[in-house]
Image: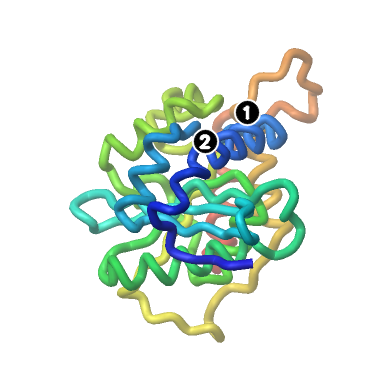
Amino acid sequence: MDIVIADKSHIKFASLICDTIEESAKVRGTGIAKRTPEYIISKIESGNAVIAVDGDKFAGFCYIEAWGHEKFVANSGLIVHPDYRNMGLAKKIKKTTFEHSRKKYPDAKIFGITTGLAVMKINYELGYKPVTFSELTDDPTFWKGCQTCKNYDILQRTERKMCLCTGMMYDPKEKENAEERHPYNSKVLQRLKNIKQALFLKKKKPSKDAIIPLEEGYISLKKVMAKLKGK
């Protein structure tokens, strides 16, 4: 298994990468923005993509996006082919993409938005911290990319303040201290996800317990975010 910076020899996998992302979105059911082969190719040609290959077989992928005059960088589209899941490959790809981002954009804040608890855990281990959407880039091009996500209406209804995704960020200007970092807590992240789903997802026949008053829900979200930040 090789995890490398993608080059022109990997363009042949562009359509397969898009299909894998789309299939993953269907399985997860929480929404992943669609990508086109042309967009994936542009990332490969610019040296802003990382790919995992097993011989001549596609295994995984992730790419880099720069926003706000390179003040912000996102590691996006992390995907692993079904044949190579549950092997720790996603973490290796993410780590390689993160290190590549740090080299190409040393002063940029690296961020991501995701609904996946596994990705949140990987981000946390790399030094990311949960943040509100207001702390992310305000570049409209980034948020336009969410339009193909099935949950885009939630982002619109909240005036781009929050969605089912959780925002996480690595700030190179902040001195990392492993001893001071708040311990990773999967239960807290799961609760954050559950609250958002109860607030925003429209269900045909929601149970009484599944309904959270809007004001109460926002208060709960703030409490969970504060706990994640160690406050």
Looking at the picture, does residue 72 appear above or below residue 199?
A: below
Please tell me the numbered disc located at residue 213. Answer: 1
> What is the x, y in percent for residue 69?
18, 52
Residue 210 visible: yes
Looking at the picture, does residue 19 appear above or below residue 85?
A: above
Q: Nearer the viewer, residue 162 or 218?
A: 162
The residue singled out by tag 2 in the image is 15
Label 2 secondary element: helix
Task: Please identify, in this view, whether the residue under mark 1 or under mark 2 is nearer the observer.
Answer: 2
The residue sitting at the top extreme is 204
Position of 220 with respect to 72 (left or right) is right
Looking at the picture, does residue 26 appear above or below residue 42?
A: above
Q: Which of 221 and 58 is in front in this view?
A: 58
> What is the x, y in percent for residue 186?
71, 60
Quarter holding residue 138: top left
Please tell me the numbered disc located at residue 75. Answer: none
Mark 1 or mark 2: name the one nearer the start of the chain: 2
Residue at screen point 65% across, 33% down = 23
Quadrant where the N terminus is found in the figure: bottom right
> What is the x, y in percent for residue 89?
65, 62
